[in-house]
Structure formats: structure tokens, C-alpha cells
Amino acid sequence: QVQLVESGGGLVQAGGSLRLSCAVSGRTFSSYTMGWFRQAPGKERDFVAAITWSGASSYYADSVKGRFTISRDNVKNTAYLQMNSLKPEDTAVYYCGVRYSTMTEYKYWGQGTQVTVSS
């Protein structure tokens, strides 16, 4: 079984920064893309960023481009989301997910970490 554990969330003032981590454990069997999603109260879960296995390609939602940076360390089986210039609208529960390269859907998810940005 594959498990994902997010950490690094918290309360920060607008304009501040946070760094989220997502540690993957268990047998993943093959290469996988890692992604970050977020869900605000009363809203659907939205895509934030993703990074391929090699790290050569990364993708971002328009709302976070230029402010967030996704990275990964395959030795540590960990992905990161550096969030700068945070805005109150970034407030949400942030989830990381694993999608195998041969699949279109994310197969495994973490439990989420709360990010709250105060104005």
C-alpha cells in the first residue's frame, strides 16, 4: 500500500511564505507524477501544480504561476510546494497525490494539510 503524508501547513499573513512537503512510502512499482491540489470550504478540489518523475516538467494553475514552485526529491520520495506571496484566496486544505505515468487519474492521496492566509 502506498501512503502519502503532507506537512508544512499553517497560518500565515498575506504576503508570507510556506513550504509544504509530501512524503511517499510503500511500494510504488513504477515512475509517477506528483501533484498538489487544494480544496477551499464549499468548493471542489482544484489542481495547483504537478511535476513529472524526472522533474523535467512541471505544471501550474494560472492562479499560482510565478508564486508557487513544485519540486521533488526521488531519493527521499518527497515532493515539495514552495508557496510565496500568499494571498487570502490561497486558504484551503492542500492535498498531494500520486499518478502513475501510464494512468490519467491520481491513484493515491494524502490526508491534507490546512493552509490559512490572513489578510
Image (cartoon, rainbow, N blue to C red):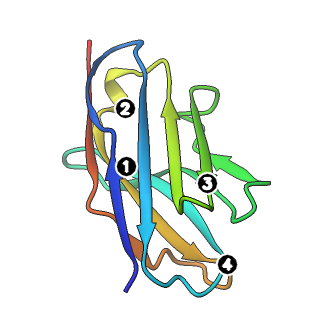
CA–CA distance in space, label 3 to label 2: 25 Å
Dot 1 or dot 3: first in sequence order is 1
Q: Which residue is mark 1?
A: 38
Taking the view exactly as shown, the residue that stands out farthest to the front is 75
Q: Are marks 4 and 3 in contact (CB under 8 Å)?
A: no
Q: Is residue 45 above or below residue 101?
A: above
Please report the residue visible at 27 percent of the width from the left and 47 percent of the height from the top: 113
| Kind of residue sitting beneath label 4 | Ser
**Residue identified by numbered label 2:** 90
Report the quarter where the C terminus lies: top left
Between the C-alphas of marks 2 and 4, the distance is: 28 Å
Q: Which residue bears the numbered disc 3? A: 73
What residue sits right under mark 4 in the picture?
101
Mark 1 or 4, closer to the camera: 4
Q: Residue at x 62, y 46 (%)?
A: 71
Quadrant position of residue 52 = bottom right
